[in-house]
Amino acid sequence: MCGIVGYFDKSGAGRPIGATLLSMLGALGRRGPDSAGVAVWGEAVDGVVVRVALSERADAAALGRELLARARRLGRVSRSAATGPFLRFTMGKVDVDALVAALESDGAEVVSLGTRLEIVKQVGAPQNLDTAFGAAKLAGTHGIGHTRLSTESRVDLSHSQPFWSHGIPDLAVVHNGHITSYHRLRRLYEQDGVRFYTENDSEVIGVYLGRKLREGASLREAMHASVRELDGSFSYLASTADTFGFAKDPFCLKPLLVAESAGAVAIANEEIALHAVLGHGYRAREAGAGEVATWDRGAGARRRRRVA
Amino acid sequence: MTSSRTRKLDADRLPVREINATIRRAAADGEREIRIEHPGARHNLAVAVLRDIRVAIDGPVGYYCGGMSDGVRLEVRGSAGWGLAECLLSGTVVVEGNAGNGAAASIRGGTVVVKGDAAARAGIAMKGGLLVVGGDCGYMTGFMMQRGRIIVCGNAGPALADSMYEGVVYVGGEIAELGNDTVVSDASAAELAEIQAALAHHGVKGPAAFRKVVSGRKLWNYDKKELAAWKAAF
């Protein structure tokens, strides 16, 4: 089943997005208790902010020190901290592909990377995200969240969502549904040298969008194309530092409710999650078949919608 | 009218099972109405209410609200999630806001009114009864319906009434795309009068004219000569 949520503050001012997402996920927890996570686009750093999941096999502290040393050989690391299995640090201008390759050479996995994107996720129910990582305190302009009921692949941190689209700073995705063309697309992309980190079919959405972005498409254009080119049942949310949006499959197989006000956009699979953070006076509607809508940060948070 | 003697139930901290049991007890005790406060968009509210009792829900509801009921008079002062009033046998279910996918799916009788928009697959496999949509309806509304009527005041989404067997769909606005094996014509004066009476009865404003969609009946029996139609339907 899985639950997905998203919140976009049109004012552009930072707000406790983490707490908002956790409230929404808490209301959807019964859609899947296997793992949970949030992605928040916070204040921009000069360079990149990186979160790495340390290998469960290795001595986490030693691996963390080793990874920081590798990062320092590629650029200036300014702040670093370790929380549980996560190492977080910021650094100045750096070749992203080289950095990811250096960090992931022996079992560690970069969970998120971008000027504004931060992802925390773990096995278990959404409530644990705050106790383990203080996720409620994450501030930003927008964010997405996921609570997982695993159906096809294993339950561990790596297979949890949101998924950062590896190699594309600030692009992350949450998905409810099943991409039935996953194996075909994965074969195709792997022939092209793409590395898949999991056996979770949802991962292919981020890979797909990332490839489109590398080819010069906007996120909005990539999402529109995805409705035609991905197969299966999906409601997904995708976002970069500047654009936030949702896409729904052409057969309307998965629920997705949207409530938009003058100040914000809230999205979830069930109204119960919207109700948890919007209270009263909002109007929710079910997204249509093949519908894509995106909102851009700044310039009055323009919204553009089209049904495929 | 809500009298001062109407029983009120604050649903805020109650399990759904207890809310529904309270509604059924009230109906069994012969109470005429019950009001549910703070529904919190939760699922499965007021399902399987098998008597004539007015249930007024003050706020949004989640999935399957009012499903499997027989004789209920249900009002939702908010929006509703997927599967609103599924398999309703008789009675009325009125939603002030929008409804999610599959509103009034498989109903056998009664009336379901969605004053806002109804999402995909509204009224699919209807076997009787009436579905009124004040706004627009989504993809595949009326798919494989077998009997009954759907009135859509606004626009209809793609694949409208695809592969319907019987029944009729009236649309006041634009039809994005007709489903397989459907025939469209203008509603007659007598039909328009009936539509307007139904809308007026539920306080829904509709346009003056409606298009009428019925089955083309080409898919009723397999016919080699209709191979192209069958291919399109599948």
Image: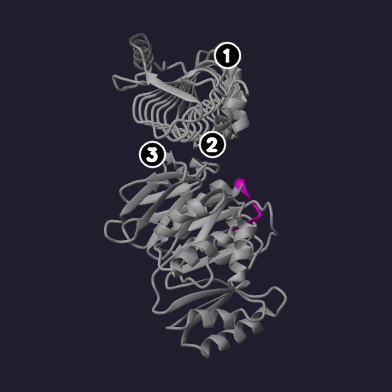
Q: Residue furthest right?
A: A57
Q: Quadrant of residue A170?
A: bottom left
Quadrant location of residue B198?
top left
Indicate yes or no whether the magenta region holds residue A178: no
Q: CA distance from mark 1 to mark 2?
A: 22 Å
Q: How many numbered circles are shown?
A: 3
Chain letter of the residue beneath label 1 in the structure image: B
**Of the residues shown, which amino acid type is indicated by label 1?**
Arg
The residue that label 1 is drawn on is B51
Q: Is residue B136 above or below residue A39?
A: above
The residue that mark 3 highlights is A283
Q: Closer to the observer: label 2 or label 3?
A: 3
Q: Residues within 10 Å of mark 3 (few under 14, many from 20)?
A: some
- Asked whether the residues under the numbered discs 2 and 3 touch, taking CB atoms below 8 Å apart as contact, a structural biologist would say no
Which residues, given as a range, are shown in magenta?
A30-36
Q: Residue furthest top?
A: B190
Residue A16 in view: no
The picture places residue A168, in percent across and down from the top left corner, at: 48, 71
Picture residue at 40% right of the left edge, 58% below the top: A221
Q: Which mark is residue B42?
A: 2
